[in-house]
Image (cartoon, helix red, strand yellow):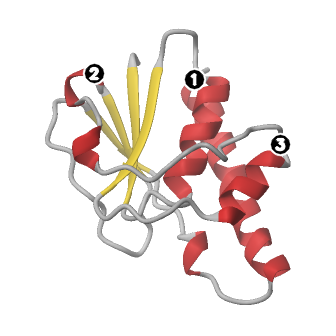
Amino acid sequence: MKGVLFLCVANSARSQMAEGIARSLAPVGTKIWSAGSRPGRVRPEAIAVLKEIGIDISGHHAKAVADVPAAEVDTVITLCGEEECPVFLGRATRLHWGLPDPAAVSGSEAERLDVFRKVRDELRRRISDLFT
């Protein structure tokens, strides 16, 4: 893998966390992006739960799929669970990791953070496996 793209709809939670985790685990020289079909804003909960494990994504911003250099992407990982995933038209190996959208969860701050942590931990496990 030389270029990995994580895709979801808003590029606000799952794909942002995946980008941050992947950047921390990827072999040197691997390029990592995240994007969405309808970019929103990076969720503060995503920033907070990655900070807990020493990863800073506070400077990230949501990006559209068109903002990613398609010719440099050789692996696309879609993360949509219940919603329809965006399409990447470039040539690439495709994987689908259907994960629930933690941004869709309501409740107390503690409850929301717990859901973000569960998704973070699952992403970290899968991304670690991907690069080993």
Sequence-wise first label, 3 or 2:
3
Q: Is residue 45 left or right of residue 127?
A: right
Structural crowding at the residue carrying mark 1, measured as other residues with C-alpha within 10 Å and reported as few (<14), some (14–19) or many (≥20): few
Instruction: Determine which quarter of the picture holds residue 55.
Output: top right
Q: Nearer the viewer, residue 132 or 76?
A: 76
Q: Is residue 29 left or right of residue 84?
A: right
Disc 2 residue type?
Answer: Glu
At horizontal 77% and vertical 70% (from top left) the residue drawn is 113
Q: Which residue is mark 3?
A: 53
Decide: marks 1, 2 in contact (CB < 8 A)? no
Q: Is residue 90 left or right of residue 103?
A: left
Q: Is residue 35 left or right of residue 56?
A: left
Q: Which residue is mark 2?
A: 72
Decide: marks 3, 2 in contact (CB < 8 A)? no
Disc 3 residue type?
Answer: Ile
Mark 1 residue element: loop
Mark 3 residue element: loop
At horizontal 22% and vertical 31% (from top left) the residue drawn is 70
At horizontal 80% and vertical 87% (from top left) the residue drawn is 108
Structural crowding at the residue carrying mark 3, measured as other residues with C-alpha within 10 Å and reported as few (<14), some (14–19) or many (≥20): few
Q: Alpha-carbon distance for marks 1 and 2?
A: 18 Å
Of all residues, the one furthest to the top in this rendering is 28
Reply above or below: 21 against 107. above
Q: Position of residue 2 (x, y in %)?
A: 39, 16
Reply above or below: 126 against 97. above
Q: Alpha-carbon distance for marks 3 and 1?
A: 18 Å
Sequence-wise first label, 3 or 1:
3
Q: Position of residue 57 (x, y in %)?
A: 65, 43
Mark 3 vs mark 1, foreground winner is 3
Q: Which residue is mark 1?
A: 131
Instruction: Determine which quarter of the picture holds residue 43.
Output: bottom right
